Image: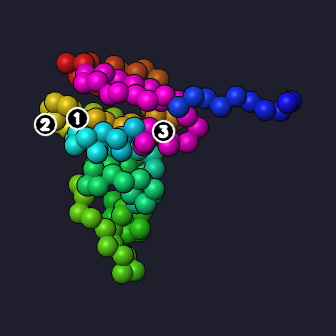
Amino acid sequence: MSGLTEAEPIVEIDMSPRMSYIVKESKPTRCYDIVQREIIKARPTMIIARTSPIEIREKFEIGKTTVIWLTMSEKFADNLPPSALGVASAGREVAETNDEYVKPGDLPKLYSLALNFLDGHQDGVILFEGFEYLATHNSFQSLMNFLQKLNENIVQ
């Protein structure tokens, strides 16, 4: 049986309040499965992602969950195509959302959005997908400071 590798076991995660979890995977699928289960339980959820909101909404049932898109593209008003934002186009209907668009180098804005969400939702869940993208646009120290401050707020 050469050439065969053992698949990683699928682990069910029971999300506990005030905890941070890391899901290491080459393509974000398990993390969205976990978030979908939390959404079904009616837990407030925010997604911070490198993937565009429309792609996320097409692949996963996230309802009106806010997506913070990490992108260097300008906002819709600055000629970003409607399909990239999840805005209705070509007769297609899209649910009203509160999506935001943050440049990967704007850690203060990203921190503020996450903190405001946590302040308003004591049992909230934040899915953070695209950490490697932030790493290419920020210094190691500033990124570590951001993550440590965010984790401290999650624990509190």
The answer, for residue 52, to whether it is visible in the render is: no
Find the residue positioned furthest to the right.
Answer: 2
Q: Nearer the viewer, residue 41 or 54?
A: 41
Q: Main secondary structure of the magenta part?
A: loop
The structure residue drawn at horizontal position 42% and vertical position 43%, both measured from the top left corner, is 32
Q: How many marks?
A: 3
- Quadrant of res 81: bottom left
Circle 3: element type: helix
The crowding category of the residue bearing disc 1, from other C-alpha atoms within 10 Å (few below 14, some 14 to 19, many at least 20), is some
Mark 2 residue type: Gly
Q: Nearer the viewer, residue 1 or 98?
A: 1
Q: Classify 11 as above or below 102.
A: above
The answer for how far apart the CA atoms under marks 3 and 1 are is 18 Å
Which residue matches tag 3? Answer: 30
- Which quarter of the rendered picture does the N terminus lie within? top right
What mark, if any, has residue 120 been given in the picture? 2
The crowding category of the residue bearing disc 3, from other C-alpha atoms within 10 Å (few below 14, some 14 to 19, many at least 20), is some
The answer for how far apart the CA atoms under marks 1 and 2 are is 8 Å
Mark 3 residue type: Arg
Q: Classify 21 as above or below 132.
A: above
Magenta span has 15? yes
- Disc nearer the start of the sequence (3/2): 3
Left or right: where 156 falls relative to 49: left
The structure residue drawn at horizontal position 27% and vertical position 50%, both measured from the top left corner, is 65
Mark 1 residue type: Gly
Q: Position of residue 137 (x, y in %)?
A: 47, 37
For the residues labelled 1 and 2, say whether their Cβ atoms are less than 8 Å apart. yes
The answer for how far apart the CA atoms under marks 3 and 2 are is 26 Å
Region in magenta: 11-33
Circle 1: element type: loop
